[in-house]
């Protein structure tokens, strides 16, 4: 299948100025093709379904949203170095590239949101914003150039340099996938005492714990780039097209409150700007704070929601220096501390 897909890609060239990202495209097709297999009677189990949901929370909400996004990309809170690195390894198991490349791409998105240099604006097309930017390559700067420009702070840490080097992040992902199969194999072997049962349960755990969960988390993350820049309501009058999408927030545990995030990028709380905006990732950060594993959690700034936007002549607003007006000149950029300040 991989050989025929490669020859198909060679015959069908993308538009001038673009070229295929072969490995990504082949991975996406292979993972999606395996999903129906998980639904067959041989491999379906409710334990597997539960494993996919728990895995989504652990690897996507905690690994990607809490760590890659709010901790590494935006420095919305601080945590012990051992915890930061552990969470980063969980994020790597989400198969969304290395921590440095993820953060560099994301900071570039904030710097150029919905402009020409935005890596994944859906204003180009919904398909482009969702997945197109991942399967064809524009004349982008090389990943090392991109990372030097946007995540120089992360590259000072040998841990992240090492994960990036020789695509170690990919090997970590493969290792965790083998663990899923191995754990299932042992369960099947122990329960039924046959190699066939071990292979069946191992494959089932691999399909639900890795393949289905990764495909779900891919589309959840990609939908933040596409859906949450097209459909939903706005609390803040940002200069981009970001939206708060309640359905996406529900299925991503809080990543869909995207207009709130663009309106207040350093805040650890993407939801909870209005009472109904449930944000499971933020509650996870608060739980870590309660047990002393997170501190300096950046609170919501006193931005004015569109619904209660004050008059420019409001004397209370004019006198309060902590009130941040809309469209600050630097609001399109992600502030990154020059020096990382954290505990070992
Ligand atoms: Zn962000
Ligand atoms: Zn965005």
Image (cartoon, helix red, strand yellow):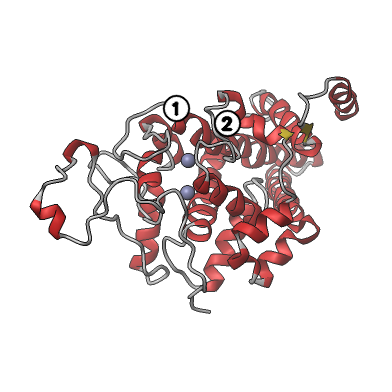
How many numbered discs?
A: 2
- Quarter holding the N terminus is top right
Q: Is residue 42 above or below residue 116?
A: above
Q: Are marks 2 and 1 in contact (CB under 8 Å)?
A: yes
For image coordinates 84% across by 25% down, the residue present is 9
Question: Tag 1 or tag 2, which sits nearer the N-term?
Answer: 2
Q: Position of residue 318 (x, y in %)?
A: 15, 55
Residue under numbered circle 2: 129
Judge by depth and name the residue closer to the eye, 40 or 154. 154
- State the SS at label 2: helix
For image coordinates 52% across by 36% down, the residue present is 225
Badge 2: residue crowd in 10 Å (few <14, some 14–19, many ≥20): many
Q: Position of residue 110 (x, y in %)?
A: 50, 47
View extreme (bottom): residue: 344
Residue 126 in sight here = yes
Residue 59 in sight here = no
Q: Position of residue 300 (x, y in %)?
A: 29, 55
- State the SS at label 1: loop
For image coordinates 39% across by 30% down, the residue present is 247
Q: Position of residue 293 (x, y in %)?
A: 42, 69
The mark found on residue 287 in the picture is none
Q: Quadrant of residue 154?
A: bottom right
Badge 1: residue crowd in 10 Å (few <14, some 14–19, many ≥20): some
Q: Is residue 257 above or below residue 85?
A: above
Note whether ligand 2 is within 8 Å of mark 1.
no
Residue under numbered circle 1: 230
Q: CA distance from mark 2 to mark 1?
A: 10 Å
């Amino acid at each position: 299948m991989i050989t025929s897909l490669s020859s198909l890609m060679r015959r069908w060239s993308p538009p001038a100025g673009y070229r295929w990202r072969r490995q990504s495209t082949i991975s996406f097709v292979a993972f999606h093709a395996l999903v129906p297999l998980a639904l067959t009677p041989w491999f379906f189990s409710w334990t597997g379904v539960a494993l996919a949901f728990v895995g989504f929370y652990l690897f996507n909400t905690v690994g990607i949203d809490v760590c890659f996004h709010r901790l590494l990309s935006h420095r919305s809170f601080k945590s012990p170095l051992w915890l930061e690195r552990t969470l980063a390894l969980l994020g790597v198991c989400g198969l969304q590239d290395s921590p440095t490349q993820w953060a560099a791409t994301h900071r570039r998105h904030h710097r150029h949101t919905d402009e020409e240099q935005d890596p994944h604006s859906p204003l180009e097309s919904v398909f482009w914003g969702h997945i197109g930017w991942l399967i064809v390559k524009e004349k982008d700067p090389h990943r090392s150039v991109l990372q030097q420009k946007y995540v120089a702070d992360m590259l000072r840490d040998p841990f992240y340099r090492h994960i990036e080097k020789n695509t170690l992040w990919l090997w970590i992902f493969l290792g965790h996938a083998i663990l899923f199969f191995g754990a299932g194999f042992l369960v099947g072997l122990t329960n039924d005492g046959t190699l066939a049962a071990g292979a069946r349960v191992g494959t089932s755990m691999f399909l639900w714990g890795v393949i289905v969960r990764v495909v779900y988390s891919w589309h959840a993350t990609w939908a933040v780039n596409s859906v949450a820049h097209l459909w939903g309501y706005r609390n803040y009058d940002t200069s981009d097209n970001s939206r708060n999408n309640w359905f996406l927030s529900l299925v991503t545990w809080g990543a869909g409150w995207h207009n709130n995030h663009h309106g207040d990028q350093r805040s650890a709380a993407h939801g909870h700007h209005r009472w109904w905006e449930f944000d499971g990732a933020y509650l996870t950060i608060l739980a870590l704070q309660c047990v002393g594993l997170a501190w300096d959690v950046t609170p919501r700034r006193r931005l004015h929601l569109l619904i209660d936007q004050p008059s420019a002549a409001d004397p209370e607003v004019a006198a309060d220096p902590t009130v941040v007006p809309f469209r600050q000149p630097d609001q399109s950029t992600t502030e990154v501390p020059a020096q990382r300040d954290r505990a070992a």
